[in-house]
Amino acid sequence: MQRFINDPDFVVDDMLRGFAKAHADKVYISRDNDHVVAIRERDRKRKIGLISGGGSGHEPAFLGYVGRGSLDAVAVGEVFASPPAETFYDAMIAANYNNEVIGLLGNYAGDVMNFKMAADMAKQDGITARYVTAHDDIASAKKGDEQNRHGIAGGYFMWKIGGARANEAATADEIILSVQNVVNKTRSIVVGLSSLTIPSVGKPNFTVEPGKMEFGIGHHGEPGIETADLAEADGVAEKMTQALLDDFEFDRPRHVAVMISGLGAMPMMEAYILYNKVEEVIRNAGHRIDHVYIGNFVTSLNMNGVSLTIVELDDEIERLLTEPDVPVGLENY
Amino acid sequence: MQRFINDPDFVVDDMLRGFAKAHADKVYISRDNDHVVAIRERDRKRKIGLISGGGSGHEPAFLGYVGRGSLDAVAVGEVFASPPAETFYDAMIAANYNNEVIGLLGNYAGDVMNFKMAADMAKQDGITARYVTAHDDIASAKKGDEQNRHGIAGGYFMWKIGGARANEAATADEIILSVQNVVNKTRSIVVGLSSLTIPSVGKPNFTVEPGKMEFGIGHHGEPGIETADLAEADGVAEKMTQALLDDFEFDRPRHVAVMISGLGAMPMMEAYILYNKVEEVIRNAGHRIDHVYIGNFVTSLNMNGVSLTIVELDDEIERLLTEPDVPVGLENY
């Protein structure tokens, strides 16, 4: 296994130590729990604490989204494993200002279950903890069953809008409304060209045959919609974009934001090659792209692959997207 | 070849089209030359145009470093190939404000040669074009022969300091002095765990045996200092850090900046695992880390590998590092 790791069973501990040191001016590790990353200096106007949490291996998600204008605390799980209820609870405590905390989660069953258990624990302390889940991955459940879709790179917009609203001193109800709105208007699709290797397993989780692509693969290698021949980039980009547009079923031209996120091992050159066609397909469909995000936002260990996300914009989302935010895991990229 | 590309011979053209669209509000492609990316709105106080240029495959370098507080124009070469003199010339024209342009280059022979030819051409137009080269890669030439070392991720600091000085309305002489100062105080070292695949070649350029690492490998696969057993991350981090500290020969405790840059296919989790030990080694040597940069700053196509850069800080560098800059290729990461 060609990797920069120490003991494969302690990659998350090692990462957390390095992360806390690298961003020591902005974040700290909770004294109660060495798997909770929290912001040092909260935004002045913010009344409501925002947290997230999930398995590791998706860096900069989730821990990198702690920061001003973004999340207050994150519960960090082991690789691809939900953080235990206690860790979510400790994140709630770290993020608590006024006894109301909102979880902005990725809609994985374990994360939601453990968050709920943690919310019951927090209730004993007089803290109300509610949650919203991103469900942008259209390949993870059929249309009509959106509530069972997983959250992937589209989570960026949930954290962004939630953070911006919280900084406007919005109430918990108001934040949840705004976040739910952007979640409902966000769709993503993934294409994988390689497997990924969980450090403690030490060998690839599955196989992608040369010349093939996994269309709609999940961020943990969950089977996608189909194994298809790997077309030229333009063909892949068109297929991804069309799948999202079909799922949206827009009845008129819209303003949209577009995000292309590498999954960990895709060179950035290829993100731009894909974007060239994505833009053309969206434009030819009559829509207008107001914001573009290209980088590594939510990854899958060392998978060579890419996610495409489209967000249907409205006045509120447009306004909040331009608010400054500084997720610590993105600030230097 | 599991890649998102169209015709392997036109990956740079496709990338440039996507790049120009994604950042259309900030940059444009020169009408004279479709391989020149230039800034739309120059900084108000800036008197001197700053350019760079080099082969593609190192994204976000070089083209992504166009931006406010950074470069005015970049000459984009084919993959791993120097831009022709004409392209450097057209970049000079695009970046020209007051007939003085400075090139901030990576110290590869072809880049420097073509830049010089372009400078001769620009002279006919009354434009003076001088250049400075980064030479941070300590593995690329022996100590004492620093002028023959290549520039890699340390180029970030050359562009940053140059851009910040230019925005202070500094003269060309002043900018060159400041840039040369930071160049002289920057050292990097690379470890590669895999080969890389040039799209038009279609197969890996070389081989890294499982369980081995290439210590000191170059950004195009140039042979390094040694092929060594791949140790645990802590061992790799210690070896890299010590190599840089040995090369600096500090005679007293210093303030430093540290950058860890993935080479294209390294998961960000591993950058933090490495940083945990890098920080310890530097601290134990008595030095203080004032700035940390973790991300993908200068890459090598799909190589799984990492570069470590240390910059010796002084008052001027400290001051200029905190100036805002917005290289378009980094703004969304």
Image (cartoon, coloured by chain):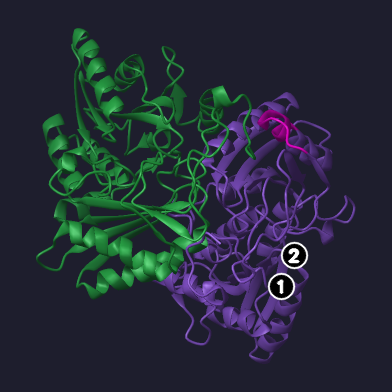
Chain colours: A green, B purple
Q: Position of residue A67 (x, y in %)?
A: 38, 35
Rendered image quadrant of residue B65 = bottom right
Q: Which residue lies most toward the bottom here?
A: B124
* Left or right of residue A61: residue A144: left
Residues A27 and A227: in front is A227
Say which residue appears at 58% left-offset and 83% top-offset: B90
The boundaries of the magenta stretch are B229-238
Q: Is residue B31 above or below residue A306?
A: below
Residue A181 at least partly seen: yes
Q: Is residue A275 above or below residue B143?
A: below
In the picture, the quarter occupied by the N terminus of chain A is: top right
Q: Which residue lies most toward the right here?
A: B144
Q: Position of residue B48 (x, y in %)?
A: 59, 71
* Left or right of residue A207: residue A4: right
Residue B235 among those drawn in magenta: yes
Secondary structure under badge 2? loop
Which amino acid, by three-letter code, is at mark 1?
A: Asp
Circles 2 and 1, Cβ within 8 Å, touching? The answer is yes
Rendered image quadrant of residue B123 = bottom right
The residues bearing labels 2 and 1 have C-alpha atoms spaced at a distance of 7 Å
Residue A39 at least partly seen: no
* Left or right of residue B299: residue A140: left
Q: Position of residue B257 (x, y in %)?
A: 64, 41
Residue annotated with mark 1: B111
Residue annotated with mark 2: B107
Residue A155 among those drawn in magenta: no
Q: Chain of mark 2?
A: B
Question: Does the magenta stretch mainly form a helix, a strand or a loop?
Answer: helix
Rendered image quadrant of residue B287 = top right
Secondary structure under badge 1? helix
* Left or right of residue B125: residue B44: left
